[in-house]
Amino acid sequence: MTTTQLTSEIRKKQSFLCVGLDIDLNKIPKFLLEKEDPIFEFNKAIIDATHDVTVAYKPNIAFYEAYGIKGWKALDKTIRYLNEKYPDVFTIADAKRGDIGNTASMYAKAFFEDLNFDSVTVAPYMGRDSVEPFLNFENKHTILLALTSNNGAYDFQTKQLEGRELYKEVLEVSKTYANSNRLMYVVGATKASYFTEIRKIVPNAFLLVPGVGAQGGSLDEVCKNGISENVGLLINSTRGIIYASNKEDFAEVARNEALKLQQQMQAYL
Ligand SMILES: O=C(O)c1cc(=O)[nH]c(=O)n1[C@@H]1O[C@H](COP(=O)(O)O)[C@@H](O)[C@H]1O
């Protein structure tokens, strides 16, 4: 999916919501555990209930890898379901990969060719040759960690490097990478006061913004300074939506939570 198509989906659905699919078998409704593939059944119910107010889904790969082959099969089924039934949604493999070039190419193949995700999250720490293999893929997007939502972000990302903060260096330098038009960036909702500075460097890039809901970030604060001409925001909520209920009504309750965020977003569109 191109960013132009993504912006038009956002305008159509009046939403820039991304729903995270981070599956913890201890948190999903007990009755699903009796099914053959509880992870997929849970994801399918959440996707079916929320897709009309959601423009992107983001399974975090750790939550699938933790369940071994069963987890990976459920991830495979989930992305195939999304691509077949809802081809208009943007898909994000939240894998936070980063390695030397030839290894990065294999990570890119795994997420872009085998699983056919639209995008993957990548750590920028190893630099240009660890990111460019992902950027080779046409119509795919690489989402670089710029300023993350956690407290550890202050360990390195906001430290000065040659006169500017490291996260700014990541934004500036990555713009010189080959096919940098395929880049997007992660900026945490808990870092809302940084959005004005970030927009000076990447005025129109799409920003994936996790941290609303369970981590306490404010959607309004992010939107005020983060929205761009092409909208340029994908705001993620995971636990606040998918684990709002662990009863039979979980999908309906998840939809209500998604709807609340979508209605808040509408005011900025
Ligand atoms: O790349 C991410 O998605 C990410 C980056 C970041 O800075 N902070 C962050 O929370 N995330 C992910 O976004 C999701 C947040 O989930 P909730 O806190 O439950 O909404 C998790 O999958 C995190 O791994």
Image (tube, rainbow, N blue to C red):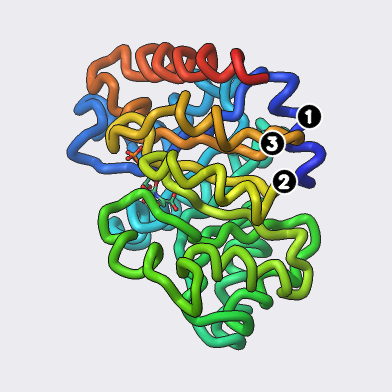
Q: Is residue 237 above or below residue 103?
A: above
**Mark 3–mark 1 CB contact (< 8 Å):** no
Residue 11 visible: yes
Give the residue at mark 3.
228
Say which element carries label 1.
Answer: helix
- Locate residue 229, reporting x and y percent: 75, 34
* Mark 3 or mark 1, earlier in chain: 1
Task: Residue type at mark 1: give it.
Answer: Ser
Compared across the picture, whether 181 is left or right of 42 comes to: right
- In space, the residues marked 3 and 1 are separated at their CA atoms by 14 Å
- Locate residue 203, reporting x and y percent: 70, 47
Q: Residue at x 47, y 54 (%)?
A: 94
* Mark 1 or mark 2, earlier in chain: 1
* Mark 3 or mark 2, earlier in chain: 2
**Mark 3–mark 2 CB contact (< 8 Å):** yes
- In space, the residues marked 1 and 2 are separated at their CA atoms by 15 Å
Residue 230, image quadrant = top right
Q: In terms of depth relative to the viewer, which is nearer, 161 or 18?
A: 161
Q: Is residue 1 above or below residue 50?
A: below
- Which label is found at residue 8? 1
Give the residue at mark 2.
204
Compared across the picture, whether 97 is left or right of 247 comes to: right
